[in-house]
Amino acid sequence: MGTADEQSALWGNRVRDWAEVQEGMVQPLYKAVLARLNIGRTTMLLDVGCGAGMFCQMVAALGANVSGLDATEAFLAVARERVPQGDFRQGDMEDLPFAEDKFDIVTGFNAFQFAESPLNALRQARRVLKPDGTLAVAIWGAPDEAQASTCLAALARLIPPPPPGAPGPFALSAAGALQPLIEQAGFETVRTDEVDCLWVYKDFKTLCRGLLASGPGAAAVQEVGEPVVRKALTAVVAPFRTATGSFEMHNRFRYLIARPRQRTAARS
C-alpha cells in the first residue's frame, strides 16, 4: 500500500475520527495486557506504534513514565494532548530514537506486523529494553476470527493490490508466524493469551467514521471516492446489524508477553 510516508499520510487523514470512534474498540485488549504488566510510578514504558495515545493515557494514569513512537505526526499531536508529560516521537520502529536499555516495558499493539522487517523491529525493541524488562506484543487473530476482516476485504478490493509479502493487518496472525521472530530477536515467551473485542457502532455513519479513519479506509477513499466506499461497506455490513440499528463485530486478538533471553557467559 505504498511507502512509509504514504502510509503515514493515509493514517493521519482523520485522526479525530480514529481517536473518538475506532481506537477504543480494543480497550479490552489494552486492559488484558495491562493486567499482566507490573506498572508502578518508576516504570519506564515505550509504546511502539502508539497511535493517538489511548494506551499511553491508561498507563500514565497508573503513574508510569510514558514514551510513544509513531510514524504519523498527526496521531502524536493527539497523544501529546492526552498525555502532556509523555515523550512522544515520530520515527520508524526499525530505528527507534531511544537509548539502549532505557525501558522497563515495551509494548506494541497491532504495530510490529506493519514493519518492513518485523524481526528488525523486535530487535530494536530488545535494544531499548532493560535486561530484566518485559515485552508485550498484540496482534490480530486469524482472519476467520475477526468479523471486521469482511470490511477490510471490501476496502482492499477498491485499491490496487499490494506487492507479495507486503506488511498488513494479518501479516503475523498465521499459526507459528510470530513466535520464531520473538525468539530470533532475543526473547523468551512467558505467556500467550487471546482477547475478544466487541466492536460496536451505534449506526452506519459512526461505522464509516471509524473504518474510514484507518489506513485502508483512507486509501480506498483516495482511490475511488467516499460514496463508492460507503456503498461497498453497505453491501457487507448487513450481517452485523442489530435490531436497534447498531452494528456489532466480534474480533479476536492475541497477545504475547516475553522477556529478554539472558546471554550466557562465554566459557574460558
Image: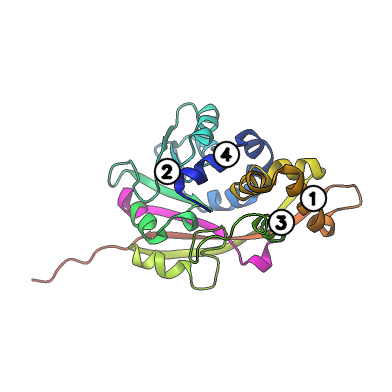
First in sequence: mark 2 vs mark 4: 2
Q: Is residue 155 above or below residue 14?
A: below
Contact flag, marks 3 and 2 (Cβ < 8 Å):
no
Between the residue at mark 3 and the residue at mark 2, the CA separation in whole angstroms equals 31 Å
Which residue corresponds to the image point at 83% horizontal and 60% vertical from the top-left?
Answer: 239
Q: What is the number of the mark on residue 46?
A: 2
Q: Nearer the viewer, mark 3 or mark 4?
A: 3
Between the residue at mark 3 and the residue at mark 4, the CA separation in whole angstroms equals 23 Å
Q: Which residue is tagged 3?
A: 151
Q: Which residue is tagged 1?
A: 231
Q: Which residue is tagged 4?
A: 54
Whether residue 56 can be seen here: yes
Q: Nearer the viewer, mark 1 or mark 3?
A: 1
Amino acid type, residue under disc 2 in the picture: Leu
Which residue corresponds to the image point at 48% horizontal and 70% vertical from the top-left?
Answer: 177
> Can you tell which quarter of the image residue 155 is in?
bottom right
**Pointer 3: residues within 10 angstroms few (<14), some, or many (20+)?**
some
Query: Residue 43 at x, y = what percent?
Result: 41, 41
Query: Residue 267 at x, y = what percent?
Result: 12, 71
Q: Nearer the viewer, mark 4 or mark 1?
A: 1
